[in-house]
Image (cartoon, helix red, strand yellow):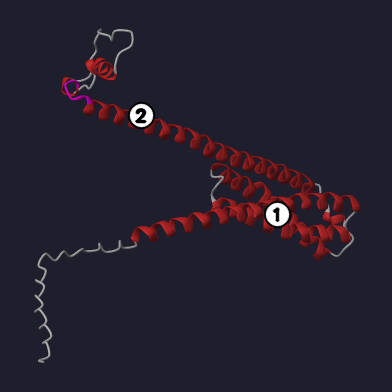
Amino acid sequence: MELFYDSRSYCSKGKVGLEESLNCSFRFLHPTIRFLGLSHRMKIVLYLLLVCSVAQAQLSSNSAVAPSSATGSASDAQVVNELLKRVQVSAEACNQDLALLRTDKWKTDAAQKQRAESAATSIRRNLTNAVPELLQHLQAAPGSLNANFKLYRNLNALCDTFSTLVESAGAFGPRYQYDQLSTDFGHLDQLRREMADRIELLTGASDAELARLRSKVAAAAKPAPPASKIVVNDHHPKPKKKKPANPPQKPQS
């Protein structure tokens, strides 16, 4: 059922009283409402105004919250994209420098040369195969704690192996090779530290959200206090009538 009717009638201009204004305004309303009394009409008008104001406030609140959350997500995605780009650039630089590494020219025994060559091959394999896949997973889910931790763990393993290779290059290889590998290791280690800070931030936010949900569930599961009962006793005992005290006897003369 439609509440309002279309009509070409209009209110006369000029000063009118409150009752005439309401009568004029309610000409367009449903007949059931049109013939109500003035007090009922005023209540309906106040109710409609209250509903409209609440709806407008709710819309304003939603429009204010949505951009802030969207801005937070966009800024986090931008930070992750910058971090992933730096990891990719560092991985490519390390891979190029390791490809030019000549461990067979180092001034050491064959066993040490073999260990250094094996470490360089392992690092290059990781940079070529594992790192790009981890970057794709993290780019698809920037807020995933699992994806962030996998990349951090891989960078941590790379830094452990890379540090040993850098030490060997400084001890047995030429100076320029040591400088190149040392610079690459510094960039990789810095990225590892930034990933550690990011994981700490994500775990803190996850713990706070988990605590909030637990408190919410605990509050919902808490039983409501029993309703207090008021007992009304209509049968009051009748007060006992007191017997009048005997008047004191006058002494006989």
| Residue drawn at (83%, 64%) of the image | 110
Mark in the foreground, 2 or 1: 2
Q: Is residue 35 magenta?
A: yes
Rendered image quadrant of residue 109: bottom right
Q: Which residue is mark 1?
A: 193
x%, y% of residue 91? 71, 46
x%, y% of residue 94? 75, 47
Q: Which residues are magenta?
A: 34-38
The first of marks 2 and 1 along the sequence is 2
Q: Amino acid at mark 2?
A: Cys
| Residue drawn at (48%, 59%) of the image | 211
Q: Which mark is residue 23?
A: none
Q: In the depicted view, which residue is nearer to us: 97 or 244?
A: 244
Q: Is residue 66 above or below residue 246?
A: above
Task: Name the secondary structure under disc 2.
Answer: helix
The residues bearing labels 2 and 1 have C-alpha atoms spaced at a distance of: 53 Å
Q: Which mark is residue 52?
A: 2
